[in-house]
Image (cartoon, grey):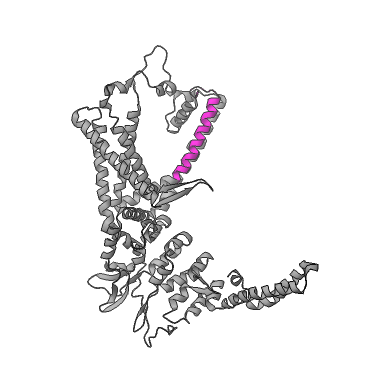
Amino acid sequence: IRHIKYGVKADYVKPFGKAILKAIEICQGSLWNERVAECWRTMWVRVSSTVQRSLNVGTNLVVVSLVQGDPEKLSDAIDCAPRGERFDWLLSVNINGEILSPLMWAIRDGKFALAEYVIDHLLEIRADRHAYYYGREKLFEKHPEVVTVLCSDCPALMDTLMDGLMWHSHSVNQGFVQVNYYLKEMYGDPKLIKNVWNSPVAQVTKLGTPDMFNHPLLNKLCLIKWHRFGKKFFIMMQIFYDLVLVMWTVGFVVYQDDCSLSLISLRVATGVLSLLAFIAMCALLVSQYRSGLVTQLNWGPKLFLKVPQFLMNPWNSARYVCYAVTTVAAFSEQCWTEEPPDARRKMGCRPWAENYGPEIPEGEPIPEVATIDWRTAVTAFSTFFLWIQFIQILILSRPLAAFTYTLSAMFVDVGRNLMIILVIIVSFAFTLTTLEQPGYESPVQAVLNLIYVILGMSSAESEALEGFGFFCLTSFVVIVEIGFLNILIAQLALIYERLSLDKEGYAKMNRAYTCVEIESFLSEKYRIKVWNEFNFDLPLQFDAGDDGPSGGIQVLEPASVRAAKKYVPDRVLRFPGEAKSTDPWPVD
């Protein structure tokens, strides 16, 4: 195959054989005799005849067009194919017994124009007097991994693929246009795809781009799954979470010092619910790990970690940790200890204040400050993360979800800038500590004072700096406040401008991911039941009495769809005249 790509012809084999046999004779020297020569000639005849046959196949018009990457030549070759074999010619080529896929060949070699031609013509709907010809089923049968390959190797061709899975009527009936969405294979047959994360939709959520979810076909598919089961189960899970959140807020925040029996019972109930949720999540993680529903995170040739798919969603990871922490906090309830709640909150002075707080003049009383014990810290941690995760409910509103996930994507980029700022702060903090400047005696205290400077809360210690210490602080202000913070502001503006164009896609992509995740929790029996309700095996009509290919759903869209970019009225190519499957299609 490599020789065919290089343009080697069968005529080259004979002179090449003479040259190689002569070269072997020279290398053998005195060991070369008639018996050895006969062995080499016999071996070369067998090898060269095989190569020659393969190279002769390479003169096939389809193979030539693939080697040259020329869509026009491929079109000329495919036009000769019988209409009943046209899709087979586009999907496989036999080179000396080895079956190759023109589509994968073109993608692998980066000949995307050729790959686009193959996809476009496989998904072309043609009709004669007796039958419709549509290569959708053969494409997915031959290449069930086509969506994964396109998303990872040439995302631009996903648009071509999804365009070929739609049909629009040219006529308007009572303000609506009939649209056929051929999404059977994109949905994923649960009888064939046991692992939901291997379905085409799941692959797009993991490997695709946000703009793919703005395509009418993928948008319709995600809406179907969302309204059929996604929304219902999402709300059920969210109600349980919100119940825990409300109980936690009442028991541990609003009435945190109340040790009445009713409040203690409420806290225990909160802990029990959190524990049950945590145990259920642990069981799910074990089940996913055993069934191979894991994602391998690689940090080196031999250093990797297999993470259950459930934890690949940051919201699930946060909720898993949060349930564990709330369980610990609930069952370490302060009212169960002999020490009154207020007694633990008041001490002469907390160690942090003694070590890093402002110095207290000798003779003055040490102010009474609140101590933060481990229970208080755990409660505060749980409260913060429980409320932060309430954001996830915004997925029910597409505009709010779009804005939220635009911000989350922004923070990922901004985090890199903040890491650099943190390194600079630590560098200057250790420098000022080494210089033994007043107020910067320890690294922690120095870091805190530099943060105060950034926030405009500079203390008297900053004004007492002299010499090189003052120069260091000035350099720090110039680099961080004037330099990096202004760059950060400009970066935020640019990132938001870029992401705002795709924020609808981000929201739809996240909702699709949620649907796939929920579907992975459902039983196979329930998934098959939902699948059967769509009746994908029934033909879809183009017009009354005109049954077309099966494998999709038929919906009525508002007539405004005709102004959409993807609207192509009645894209079926109809050919009159003789209708034999052995005849090629007429060429214009």
Residue 123 within the segment the image draws in magenta: no
Read off the magenta span: 413-441
**Residue 109 sits in quarter:** bottom right
The single residue placed furthest to the top in the displayed view is: 363
x then y, percent, for residue 359: 43, 19
Q: Residue 392 in the image: state x and y as whole percent.
A: 31, 47
Q: Position of residue 549 (x, y in %)?
A: 33, 74
Which residue in the rendered view is the most extreme toward the right?
30
Q: Main secondary structure of the magenta part?
A: helix
Q: Is residue 175 visible?
A: yes
Quadrant showing the N terminus: bottom right
State whether residue 150 is above or below residue 489.
below
For the C terminus, the quadrant is bottom left
When asked about the image quadrant of residue 274, the answer is: top left
User: Is residue 155 visible to us here?
Assistant: no
Q: Is residue 423 magenta?
A: yes
**Residue at the location (36% across, 86% down)?**
576
Residue 89 percent across, percent down from the top left? 47, 76
Please state which of residues 471 and 422 is positioned toward the viewer in this rendering: 422
Task: Please tell me which residue is depicted at 45% across the width and 63% down the height of the picture.
Answer: 150
Q: Which residue corresponds to the image point at 43% horizontal and 75% vertical from the top-left?
A: 87
Q: Nearer the viewer, residue 416 or 285?
A: 285
Position of residue 224 relative to residue 465, above or below, is below
Left or right: residue 137 versus residue 298 is: left
Q: Is residue 220 above or below residue 450?
A: below
Q: Is residue 276 above or below residue 56?
A: above
